[in-house]
Image (spheres, helix red, strand yellow):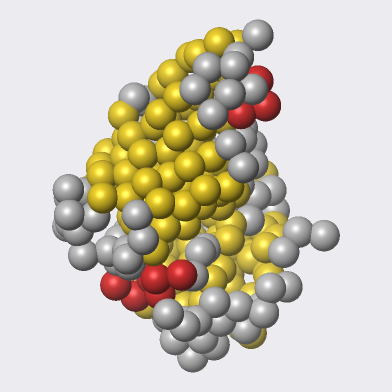
Amino acid sequence: DADVTQTPRNRITKTGKRIMLECSQTKGHDRMYWYRQDPGLGLRLIYYSFDVKDINKGEISDGYSVSRQAQAKFSLSLESAIPNQTALYFCATSESGTESNQPQHFGDGTRLSIL
Amino acid sequence: KQEVTQIPAALSVPEGENLVLNCSFTDSAIYNLQWFRQDPGKGLTSLLLIQSSQREQTSGRLNASLDKSSGRSTLYIAASQPGDSATYLCAVTGTASKLTFGTGTRLQVTL
């Protein structure tokens, strides 16, 4: 089983709908992240969480919200989806500790299309 | 604001050739630099992590170097194989463990 699992893997929906993307991990890491990937723009950070009670905005948080339900679960919501939120979304985790040697581990992504 | 650039955007080489991928970043205040591999429809696989105090890391046929003062990193792939075909991303870690990514180099190794 994958260490970082994202569901669903693919989703097509309509403008205005509320969408939730889920991420769960079995690595026991405290830190979790949500990114989106767009062609030509690379990955950009949406939100991150260092523990269950910690939520922080990233570079592009407008139009998104998150919930850290447990150490192992971190959900991303689009309250009212719009077409320019069509992208590939990634969840990642990392250990706490010395930042210089903590790699991030990524899930396989959720491909989201908003019509 | 940190910016990460990868050159070239795409590269095609014949099997067996050695190759170098380049990554540059604008702010040298980083904790580490990571190289990732991304296959189509898949997530990112971490290949190498170089801490800011290190100059290079090696894993098998891969060697990554870091020159923090000049804001540059290279990923050297020896004896390339068709299975190395993928997109290679570099990312630097800044404060609060936030990664800033480059846009990647798409590598194709031909038979």
Q: Position of residue B99 (x, y in %)?
A: 37, 60
B108 w.r.t. A83: above or below: above
Q: Position of residue B22 (x, y in %)?
A: 33, 34
Residue A75: quadrant of the picture? bottom right
Name the image quarter holding the C terminus of chain B.
top right
A33 w.r.t. B48: above or below: below
Front in this rendered view, residue A71 or A3: A3
Q: Residue at x 67, y 58 (%)?
A: A6
Outermost residue to the right: A1
Q: Position of residue B27 (x, y in %)?
A: 18, 57
Q: Residue at x 32, y 44 (%)?
A: B73
Residue B60 left/right relative to B69? right
Q: Residue at x 54, y 71 (%)?
A: A94
Residue B28 visible in this rendered orientation of the protein: yes
Residue B97 left/right relative to B77? left
Q: Residue at x 67, y 79 (%)?
A: A28
How many marks on residues?
Answer: 0
Name the image quarter holding the N terminus of chain B.
bottom left
Outermost residue to the bottom: A53
Residue B31 left/right relative to A92? left
Front in this rendered view, residue B29 or B75: B75
Residue A97 left/right relative to A22? left
Residue A112 visible in this rendered orientation of the protein: no
Front in this rendered view, residue B49 or A51: B49
Q: Position of residue B64 (x, y in %)?
A: 43, 45
